[in-house]
Image: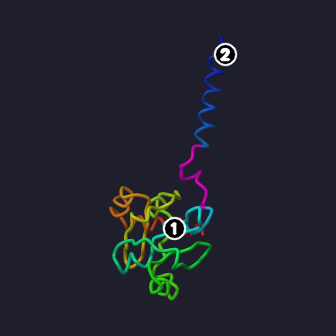
Amino acid sequence: MDKKPYIFQIALLATVLLWADGVPGRAEDKPAPRDKVCKNEAGVAAGGYDVVSYFSAKRPELGSPLFTLKREGAEYRFVSTQHRDQFAANPDAYLPQYGGHCSWALSKGKTMASDPQAWLIHKGKLYLVSSRDALSLFEADVATAIRQADEIWKRLY
């Protein structure tokens, strides 16, 4: 009996298993976000959008580098000094949940950046997600998604 075909199959299987183990994006392989707050390369949170505007204007408005405030290593931008001061007085009222990371992905055990244009205010809290498709999935069962994301976030931070 020739054992070479079996050795080849075993080697192929080992290669596939080693490759699959390193595939990014699997929840169990995905490390916690490097930073608690999701921010861009320049250190700006929420894509530069004014987090107060989600509540006051009922839509995201791009903040200005003239009106900023630093918090937890991230820069938040605002459309006015009034919005900056509102945020400074009560940041927890305006901060996106989960540091601005995608709420839907987090509910599935993954971490990824969010799109500030894909958002939801639920029970007075701001949730950002990675896309409009993710927003639809998040909204489909928002209570379960939030409960799952809350549990995972507590383990991470």
Count of labels shown? 2
Left or right: 25 as drawn, with respect to 51: right
- Residue 110 spot, x, y in % from top left: 52, 57
User: In what quadrant of the picture does the N terminus appear?
Assistant: top right
Q: Residue at x 61, y 43 (%)?
A: 22
Queried whether the magenta region covers residue 11, the answer comes back as no
- Residue 93 spot, x, y in % from top left: 46, 82
- Residue 154 spot, x, y in % from top left: 56, 70
Find disc 1 in the rendering and name its residue. 151
The amino acid beneath tag 1 is: Glu
Span colored in magenta: 23-33
Q: Is residue 1 above or below residue 147?
A: above
Pointer 1 local density, CA inside 10 Å: few below 14, some 14–19, many at least 20: few
Q: Is residue 70 above or below residue 109?
A: below
Pointer 2 local density, CA inside 10 Å: few below 14, some 14–19, many at least 20: few
* Precedes in sequence: disc 2 or disc 1: 2
The amino acid beneath tag 2 is: Lys
Find disc 2 in the rendering and name its residue. 3
Residue reaching furthest to the front: 66
Q: Residue at x 54, y 53 (%)?
A: 27
Q: Residue at x 51, y 58 (%)?
A: 112
Instruction: Find the distance from the CA under tag 2 to the CA under tag 1.
Output: 50 Å
User: In what quadrant of the picture does the C terminus appear?
Assistant: bottom right
Tag of residue 48: none
- Residue 10 spot, x, y in % from top left: 63, 26
User: Do the CB atoms of the residues marked 2 and 1 lie less than 8 Å apart?
Assistant: no
